């Protein structure tokens, strides 16, 4: 009888612990699974062109798959010139909720016009992230300096 009681308590504790771990992996720990879905984002800052600094503003949307690949679209204002481009790239997510984003901007024919990278931090159970642009390279190989930040939110976050 005493042996059965101890075994029952042990199994109940084990099951509760496993449920807590599963819940934490789904909602509390950052992973590719946690960031998969549709995102909306805005980006603001300054892009330093060879001709001088220009204000830079972006509004866009992208979809991330379970492997961290994404595609999307954006509209940008660079020094007041408006353009729309397609995006593709990858997002990597670390268990500490930091990550990186690689971006290829594509023209309507699918040609890469520039590439960029960002450092990210995921917050609010990976339903939002903040990023800083760390590099921008034009298709001709010219690297540009920038001072830009990004805020992104999941469009349809899972409910807790």
Image (cartoon, helix red, strand yellow):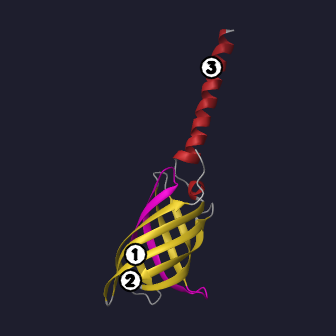
9 up-or-down from 44: above or below: above
Residue at horizontal 64 percent and vertical 30 percent from the top: 15
Q: Position of residue 35 (x, y in %)?
A: 56, 58
**Looking at the picture, does residue 147 appear above or below residue 65?**
below
Q: Which residue is mark 3?
A: 9
What predominant SS class does the magenta segment belong to? strand
141 or 132, nearer to the observer: 132
Whether label 1 touches label 2, CB < 8 Å: yes
Check if residue 121 falls in the magenta segment: yes
Identify the disc placed on residue 135: 1
Q: CA distance from mark 3 to mark 1?
A: 55 Å
| Label 2 SS | strand
**Residue linked to disc 2:** 143
> Which type of secondary structure does the marked residue at label 1 adopt?
strand
* Badge 1 or badge 2: first in the primary sequence: 1
Mark 2 surroundings within 10 Å by alpha-carbon count, few (fewer than 14), some (14 through 19), many (20 or more):
some
Q: Is residue 93 magenta?
A: no
Number of on-image labels: 3
Q: Which residue is painted at 49% across and 56% down in the image?
A: 94
Range of magenta residues: 107-133
> Relative to the observer, which residue lies in front, 57 or 90?
57
Where residue 3 appears, as percent x and y from the top left, is 66, 13
Residue 126's x, y, as percent? 51, 54
Q: With 19 as the anchor, is 151 left or right in this view?
A: left
Dot 1, how many residues are within 10 Å of its Cα: few (below 14), some (14-19), or many (20+)?
Answer: some
Q: Which mark is residue 56?
A: none
**Regarding mark 3 in the picture, which secondary structure is present there?**
helix
Based on the displayed image, in which of its 4 quarters is residue 39 positioned? bottom right
């Amino acid at each position: 009888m005493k042996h059965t009681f101890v075994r029952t308590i042990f199994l109940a504790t084990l099951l509760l612990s496993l449920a807590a771990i599963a819940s934490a992996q789904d909602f509390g720990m950052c992973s590719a699974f946690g960031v998969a879905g549709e995102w909306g984002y805005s980006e603001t800052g300054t892009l330093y062109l060879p001709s001088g600094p220009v204000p830079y503003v972006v509004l866009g949307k992208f979809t991330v798959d379970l492997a961290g690949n994404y595609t999307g679209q954006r509209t940008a204002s660079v020094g007041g010139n408006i353009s729309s481009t397609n995006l593709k790239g990858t997002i990597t997510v670390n268990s500490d909720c930091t990550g990186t984003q690689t971006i290829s901007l594509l023209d309507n024919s699918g040609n890469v016009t520039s590439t960029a990278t960002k450092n990210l931090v995921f917050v609010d159970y990976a339903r939002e992230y903040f990023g800083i642009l760390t590099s921008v390279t034009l298709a001709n190989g010219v690297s540009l300096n920038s001072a830009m930040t990004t805020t992104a939110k999941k469009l349809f976050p899972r409910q807790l």
